[in-house]
Image (cartoon, coloured by chain):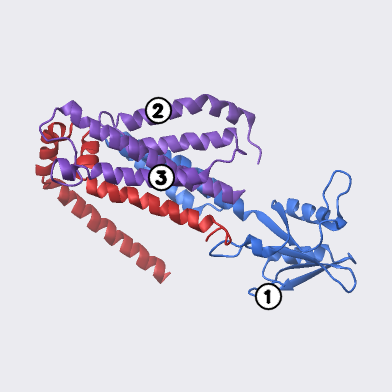
């Protein structure tokens, strides 16, 4: 299938802005609407646009599979640190009387990890579909 | 013809029941949990966005299993897309 | 407030159109529009988090997966058991084989995409299902005629048989569903 030249041009212009917007949504999840899942989905659409630019480029799928698995384990570990610091599992690992700015650090870290995990998962889904559809 | 009439009859009954219950539910809503979250989320979790505060702090147990759903779906899709000789 | 009611009524009409449309590609495009309208409805009902997720997933990633699935449906998969040096299926700059020309015209007429695979059909199996093969080409050892095998239920096979009825070199055989090609 031949991609139109106009679509490739517009995709090249739009690609960095979409990546920037995805990271903004992900990292600012505790201040503005959005969060890990939404930012990850937007990052996945950016990768989808890059398929229009270079359709023949083969990506290393095994690396993405490993990345997603390890991200899930990291999320589990980060969310269960609080068992040792606070005494209850699956909550913020910082002590309960620390300042509010420090507490939001936990939300930023977890949002970033969830964003990477969701974006790699969605990229894997449609890139396996594209490989199959060739 | 009878099948279509029965279907329309059932759908109208469903519509009437649903609209009645939804109008009744608006009148007496319990707002205690909403008030609690509006009051305490910022001081408890440090999140101005209450949705993220609930998603990543109060209900983190649920969101971890929501994340695991995606990994199961992806592994299923990759397993099905592989050819016979690639799967060991 | 009135714009919310307008969008809700628009959603009902869009969903009826999606169900009743005969063209697959049109249905997918309207599904994408449906997701966009839903996202704007989420925004007006004060759920911007959901609107962001709906725009990214519902109107970009899901239609892409559907489009790949329907583009798979318009393939005409041919497996050839004759040797690659045979001129029947050859397609180079200098010579275009007789069989290749026939199949190319045939698939272009029905708006399909011709895919020719040399070698064994065992390599085309997925893990849960064997790939749906439309046509198998063999060369008869007795009289040197080319044999085209296909499913009996396919309408395309009848047309192909009518097309090649005057040709002496080509023979079309239809096989009942469920039999194994060998």
Q: Residue A21 — which label?
A: 2
Q: Is residue A45 left or right of residue A75?
A: right
User: Which one is in front in this view, the residue at disc 2 or the one at disc 3?
Assistant: 3
Q: Indicate left or right for C9 with C45 as reference.
A: right
Of mark 2 and mark 3, the one earlier in the sequence is 2
The image position of residue B57, as x and y in percent, is 20, 40
**Discs 1/2, front:** 2
Viewport quadrant of the N terminus of chain C: top left
Categorize mark 1 by other alpha carbons within 10 Å: few (<14), some (14-19), many (20+): few
CA separation in Å, label 2 and label 3? 21 Å
SS for tag 2? helix
The answer to which of C120 and C22 lies nearer the viewer is C120
Are the residues flagged by discs 3 and 1 in contact, CB closer than 8 Å? no
Q: Which chain is blue?
A: C
Q: Quadrant of the C terminus of chain C?
A: bottom right
The secondary structure type at the circle numbered 1 is loop
Distance, label 3 to label 1, CA atoms, is: 46 Å
Q: In the rendered view, would you say C122 is above or below A28?
A: below
Image disc number at residue A68: 3
Colour chain B appears in: red
How packed is label 2: few (under 14 Cα within 10 Å), some, or many (20 or more)?
A: some
């Amino acid at each position: 299938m031949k991609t139109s030249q106009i679509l490739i041009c517009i995709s090249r212009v739009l690609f960095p802005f979409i990546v920037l917007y995805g990271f903004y949504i992900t990292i600012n999840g505790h201040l503005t609407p959005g969060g890990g899942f939404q930012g990850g989905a937007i990052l996945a659409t950016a990768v989808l646009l890059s398929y229009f630019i270079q359709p023949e480029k083969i990506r290393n799928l095994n690396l993405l599979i490993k990345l997603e698995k390890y991200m899930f384990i990291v999320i589990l570990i980060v969310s269960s640190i609080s068992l040792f610091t606070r005494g209850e599992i699956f909550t913020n690992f910082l002590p309960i009387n620390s300042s509010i700015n420090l507490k939001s650090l936990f939300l930023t870290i977890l949002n970033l990890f969830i964003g990477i995990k969701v974006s790699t998962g969605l990229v894997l889904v449609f890139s396996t579909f594209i490989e199959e559809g060739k | 013809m009878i099948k279509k009439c029965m279907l329309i009859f059932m759908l109208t009954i469903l519509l009437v029941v649903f609209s009645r219950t939804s109008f009744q539910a608006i009148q007496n809503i319990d707002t205690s949990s909403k008030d609690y979250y509006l009051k305490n989320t910022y001081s408890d979790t440090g999140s101005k966005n209450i949705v993220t505060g609930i998603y990543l702090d109060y209900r983190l147990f649920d969101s971890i299993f929501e994340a695991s759903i995606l990994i199961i779906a992806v592994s299923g899709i990759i397993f099905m897309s592989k050819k016979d000789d690639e799967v060991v | 407030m009135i714009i919310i009611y307008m969008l809700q009524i628009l959603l009902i009409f869009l969903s009826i159109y999606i169900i009743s449309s005969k063209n697959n590609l049109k249905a997918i495009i309207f599904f994408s529009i449906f997701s966009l309208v839903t996202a704007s409805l989420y925004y007006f009902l004060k759920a911007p988090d959901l609107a962001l997720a709906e725009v990214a997933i519902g109107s970009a990633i899901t239609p892409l997966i559907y489009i790949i699935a329907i583009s798979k449906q318009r393939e005409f998969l041919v497996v050839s058991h004759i040797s690659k040096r045979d001129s029947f299926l050859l397609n180079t700059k200098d010579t275009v084989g007789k069989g290749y020309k026939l199949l190319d015209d045939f698939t272009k007429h029905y708006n399909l995409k011709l895919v020719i695979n040399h070698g064994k059909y065992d390599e085309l199996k997925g893990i849960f299902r064997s790939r749906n093969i439309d046509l198998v080409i063999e060369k008869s050892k007795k009289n040197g005629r080319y044999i085209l095998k296909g499913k009996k239920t396919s309408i395309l096979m009848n047309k192909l048989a009518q097309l090649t009825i005057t040709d002496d070199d080509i023979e079309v055989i239809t096989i009942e569903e469920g039999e194994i090609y060998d």
